[in-house]
Image: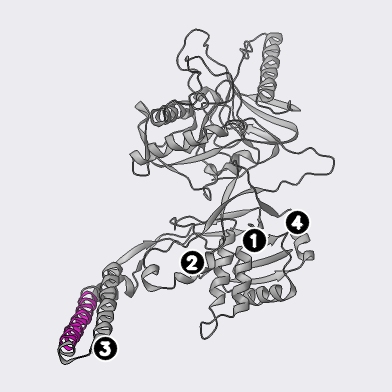
């Protein structure tokens, strides 16, 4: 076993995901620790590294992804956006400078070749030709150097006044995450390094000063089994475990074999100018769920399969009561871009057009609810495939990619009178918890609806003035909800509470939702919509989506007490 503890000395961490400088990530991805150790590898006064330290990092990158223990409660703090002056390097076009530097190097190579030919000349004629070629190459080198010098001086003169007066500034934000416990533990439970390798890694950890941004100062150390046991027993920490399952809560960036060599190669000037996103690998993770002695393992719903989150990046503000219309528009767009023949699990219909009586793709608009500052607006959409529909993943990914390509990465969603949205695929490491799968699938006993359940059967007159008739209708509604839970593979709830209003902040009352289904036809009748609070006899793992509208965003539940934004 090897365990490395990282302590954030300032109690906060500035960890922005690649390409998303306004967001933060939590927990810190394992590859960040490897980056920090590589930085420590070359942090000696002369910039050198020892063979033993390199061997230690090569051994580390060959290990499977580690377990990550991080604080359960971590909130994002966003400082006001500010305009900051650009650095001196930004005064020049790095690509032009790179080209001119490359031209200088080519000219130097030609001078060396000409001098070599001059030395190897066998007679006066060859010697004269080689001398003229060397003179031309030397002249060309001087011209190239002069062109580079003139360009640097010219651009500096043009932009220096703006730099000095702060006229040329860029908008910057500095978001940080503040965990309840400022330590993170990375654990390789199956790795048994020898004493020499462990001591070498401990020495490298002692030289680590930051994780992520330079303001995220840390103390890093190798710890023993006793310390690991404290993390396991502390309820303030959650454990993220690597998994091989297709359906996961999060994907973390992890070290991969050959990463040390790639990072070492990036010290070359030209390659460093190409971009600031460092090489990495991705691996699926799941949160470890503690099961008390004598308690059953969490039960999964039939929809706990493949999950894709789409984030609304532009378009009108829409309340949760528009969820069915948004879901219908998303399904139409996906089917319009799906490869032929369209799998039944995506369309929800058999080839003859009749409804599919098996679980299929659910389109779930996701509202921001459950927090005292929540506004109930839809933040995005989740595409969820059932457990037994992994064969349809390629078709779904193809349809989604075609749709995204149509808008150059932002899929246009036309919803008629509701307007037009632009949707982007939300990264697996999203920090917007409304779009985080874990917000909706976290194992829990208590679940509450955020959109009302469309009852499969008409319970009767719920608000009849006749007491017996009214009580009979509510009992029938409760029985229908219990049956809906069993229909998606969950145990019968121990307690069901129904109401026309929601049970968590920002949830819209059932009366605010349009009649479902919107179109009447043979065998189609308007469903009764009700909110519910469910208490199960054992932990249940979502997504929990109940009722006749479960594939169109109605009946979506969340674990009660989950705070998200």
- Counting residues from the start of the chain, the first of labels 3 and 1 encountered is 1
- Contact, mark 3 vs mark 2 (Cβ under 8 Å): no
- Counting residues from the start of the chain, the first of labels 3 and 2 encountered is 3
Say if the magenta span includes residue 137.
Answer: yes
- Counting residues from the start of the chain, the first of labels 4 and 3 encountered is 3
Residue at x 34% of width, y 63% of height: 170
Residue 262 shows which numbered tag? 2
For marks 4 and 3, give the one nearer the viewer: 3
Magenta stretch in the rendered image: 129-156
Residue at x 69% of width, y 20% of height: 483
Q: Which residue is mark 1?
A: 63
Disc 4 to disc 3, how far (Cα)? 73 Å
Q: Secondary structure at mark 3?
A: loop
Disc 2 to disc 1, how far (Cα)? 17 Å
Disc 4 to disc 2, how far (Cα)? 34 Å
Closest to the observer, 144 or 381: 144
Residue 200 lies, in percent from the top left, at: 67, 76
């Amino acid at each position: 076993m090897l365990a490395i503890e990282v302590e954030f000395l300032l109690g906060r961490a500035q960890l922005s995901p690649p390409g998303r400088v306004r967001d933060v990530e939590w927990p810190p991805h394992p590859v960040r620790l490897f980056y920090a150790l590589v930085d420590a590898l070359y942090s000696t006064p002369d910039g050198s590294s020892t063979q033993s330290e390199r061997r230690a990092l090569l051994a580390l990158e060959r290990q499977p992804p580690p377990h990550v223990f991080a604080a359960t409660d971590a909130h994002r703090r966003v400082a006001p956006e500010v305009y900051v002056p650009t650095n001196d390097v930004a005064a020049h076009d790095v690509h032009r400078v790179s080209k001119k530097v490359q031209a200088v190097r080519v000219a130097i190579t030609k001078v060396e070749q000409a001098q070599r030919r001059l030395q190897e000349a066998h007679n006066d004629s060859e010697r004269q030709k080689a001398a003229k070629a060397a003179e031309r190459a030397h002249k060309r080198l001087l011209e190239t150097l002069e062109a580079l010098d003139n360009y640097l001086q010219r651009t500096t003169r043009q932009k220096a006044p703006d730099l000095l007066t702060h006229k040329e500034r860029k908008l910057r934000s500095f978001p940080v995450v503040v965990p309840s416990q400022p330590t993170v533990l990375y654990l390789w439970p199956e790795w048994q390094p020898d004493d020499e390798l462990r001591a070498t890694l401990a020495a490298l950890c002692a030289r680590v000063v930051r994780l992520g941004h330079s303001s995220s100062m840390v103390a890093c150390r190798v710890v023993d089994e006793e310390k690991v046991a404290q993390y396991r027993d502390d309820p303030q920490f959650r454990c993220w475990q690597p998994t091989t399952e297709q359906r996961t809560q999060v994907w973390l960036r992890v070290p991969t074999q050959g990463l040390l060599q790639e990072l070492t190669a990036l010290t070359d000037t030209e390659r460093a100018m190409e971009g600031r996103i460092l090489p990495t690998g991705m691996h699926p993770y799941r949160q470890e769920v503690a099961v008390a002695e004598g308690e059953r393992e969490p039960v999964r719903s039939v929809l706990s399969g493949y999950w894709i989150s789409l984030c609304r990046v532009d378009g009108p503000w829409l309340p949760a009561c528009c969820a069915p219309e948004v879901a219908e528009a998303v399904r139409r767009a996906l089917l319009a871009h799906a490869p032929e023949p369209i799998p039944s699990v995506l369309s929800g219909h058999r080839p003859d057009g009749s409804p599919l009586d098996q679980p299929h793709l659910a389109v779930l608009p996701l509202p921001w609810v459950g927090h005292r500052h929540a506004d109930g607006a839809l933040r995005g959409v989740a595409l969820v495939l059932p457990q037994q529909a992994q064969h349809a993943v390629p078709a779904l990914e193809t349809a989604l990619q075609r749709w995204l390509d149509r808008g150059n990465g932002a899929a246009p969603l036309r919803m008629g009178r509701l307007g037009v949205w632009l949707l982007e695929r939300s990264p697996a490491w999203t920090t917007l918890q409304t779009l985080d799968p874990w917000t909706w699938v976290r194992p829990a006993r208590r679940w509450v609806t955020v959109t009302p359940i469309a009852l499969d059967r008409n319970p009767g007159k719920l608000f009849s003035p006749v007491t017996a008739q009214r009580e009979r209708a509510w009992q029938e509604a409760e029985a229908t909800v219990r049956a809906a839970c069993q229909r998606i593979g969950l145990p019968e709830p121990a307690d069901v509470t129904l109401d026309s209003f929601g049970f968590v902040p920002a949830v819209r009352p059932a009366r605010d939702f349009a009649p479902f289904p919107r179109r009447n036809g043979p065998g189609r009748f308007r469903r009764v919509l009700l909110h519910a609070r469910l208490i199960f006899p054992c932990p249940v793992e979502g997504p929990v989506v109940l009722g006749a509208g479960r594939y169109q965003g109605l009946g979506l539940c969340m674990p009660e007490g989950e705070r998200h934004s």
